[in-house]
Image (cartoon, rainbow, N blue to C red):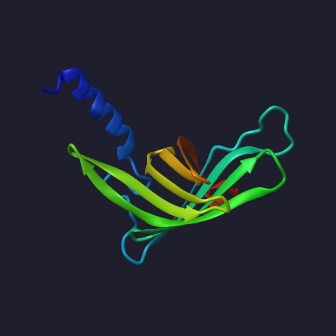
Amino acid sequence: MVNASSKVATLLLLSAFVYSPRGFSQCAPQPGERVVESFSSLATVGGLEYPSGMELMLDEHGTSVKAVLRDYYGEPTVEEIKLVGSIREKEFDGATVCEVRLTGMSKRGAVRIRAAITRGDLQGSIERHLGRGTFINRISLKRRLPVETLTTSG
């Protein structure tokens, strides 16, 4: 039997995943519609000249997604991985979650991302296959504003 506090905790967790920039009731673009979104965790670390972190750009067409993942290691070169997948609304206990699933190949092996888009970020996990090892890490990427939003008139 589920106690009241665990049910409340579940609902609070889900409420973080319900919001979509396109509104509460729709995650994926309508057929024929295109949405481009960008998320990042880039930061300057330890006085390095170049940033570290990752950047994920999504190009959504209906429920299909093409994506580019860029890994920054504090060096002038950036590893870029092309991914494909889907975005869909998922109902869970009366709430709508925007779920993104992506797969691709890096120079070192397969890469999979499973995440949820929220109001200000993308939360989930990244799975990397390197040689015989599989490494799974949590990711939290902040939403980046579109370039046209950043331009000012005048």
Instruction: Give the answer, above or below, for where 88 lies relative to 50.
Output: below
Name the spot of residue 150 as percent of width and height, x first: 67, 54
Quarter of the figure with residue 108:
bottom right
**Closer to the camera in the image, 25 or 91:** 91
- Residue at 12% from the left image edge and 26% from the top image edge: 1
Q: How many numbered badges does the structure rendering display?
A: 0
Quarter of the figure with residue 67:
bottom right
Tell me if I can see residue 67 in this picture.
Answer: no
- Determine the residue located farthest toward the bottom in the rendered image: 32
Name the spot of residue 149 as percent of width and height, x first: 62, 56
Quarter of the figure with residue 86:
bottom left
Q: Is residue 52 left or right of residue 59?
A: right
**Closer to the camera in the image, 107 or 51:** 107
Q: Is residue 13 left or right of residue 135?
A: left
- Determine the residue located farthest toward the front in the rendered image: 132
Q: Is residue 17 left or right of residue 58?
A: left
Name the spot of residue 23 as percent of width and height, x first: 37, 54
Name the spot of residue 91 as percent of width and height, x first: 25, 51
- Residue at 81% from the left image edge and 31% from the top image edge: 46
- Determine the residue located farthest toward the left in the rendered image: 1
Q: Quadrant of the C terminus?
A: bottom right
- Residue at 40% from the left image edge and 67% from the top image edge: 29
- Residue at 20% from the left image edge and 45% from the top image edge: 94
Q: Is residue 18 left or right of residue 153?
A: left
Tell me if I can see residue 62 in this picture.
Answer: yes
